[in-house]
Image (tube, rainbow, N blue to C red):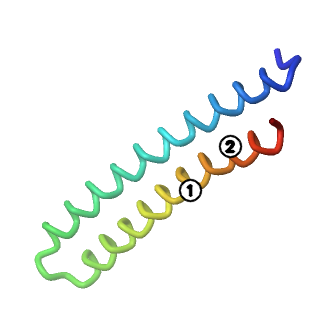
Amino acid sequence: NVKTVGNFQTLLQSIVGWVQVFFYIIATLFIILAAYDYLTSGGSEEKVKAAKQRVIYAIVAIAVAVIAGGVVRLVQTFID
């Protein structure tokens, strides 16, 4: 139960922490899949393009995770 501002901060930190972990795991999987696609492409332009797209998605996932952590710190600054 959220009854104080401190409890809200703790809840928000916990949620964002799990979201960050989720995005890091997804990004890692996308990088591994992109590497596999690239290595098994055999020169196929379509597979190389798909691998590049997966790397871009991984970078976006990492950026979202980093921004989520920054938002928590920003909210903490305004609440404290």
Q: Position of residue 73 (x, y in %)?
A: 67, 44
Q: Which residue is mark 1?
A: 64
Q: Quadrant of the N terminus?
A: top right
Q: Is residue 48 above or below residue 39?
A: below
Which amino acid is tagged 2? Val
Q: Is residue 51 left or right of residue 7?
A: left
Q: Position of residue 68 (x, y in %)?
A: 62, 49
Q: Quadrant of the C terminus?
A: top right
Crowding at dot 2, Cα within 10 Å, few <14 / some 14-19 / many 20+, comes out as: some
Q: Residue furthest right?
A: 3
- Secondary element under disc 2, as helix, strand or loop, is helix
Q: Which residue is located at x 57 percent, y 40 percent?
A: 19
Q: Nearer the viewer, residue 23 or 50?
A: 23
Q: Position of residue 21 (x, y in %)?
A: 47, 38
- Secondary element under disc 1, as helix, strand or loop, is helix
Q: Nearer the viewer, residue 33 or 27?
A: 27
Q: Which residue is located at x 14 percent, y 82 percent?
A: 43
Q: Is residue 76 left or right of residue 60?
A: right
Find residue 54 and report its image quarter: bottom left
Q: Which mark is residue 72?
A: 2
In three-dimensional space, the C-alpha distance between marks 1 and 2, rounded to whole angstroms, equals 12 Å
- Of labels 1 and 2, the one closer to you: 2
Q: Which residue is located at x 42 percent, y 48 percent?
A: 26
Q: Nearer the viewer, residue 64 or 80?
A: 80
Question: Are dots 1 and 2 in contact, CB under 8 Å?
Answer: no
Q: Is residue 49 left or right of residue 70?
A: left
Q: Position of residue 46 (x, y in %)?
A: 29, 80
Q: Is residue 17 above or below residue 69?
A: above
Find residue 52 and report its image quarter: bottom left
Which amino acid is tagged 1? Val
Crowding at dot 1, Cα within 10 Å, few <14 / some 14-19 / many 20+, comes out as: some
Q: Is residue 59 above or below residue 69?
A: below
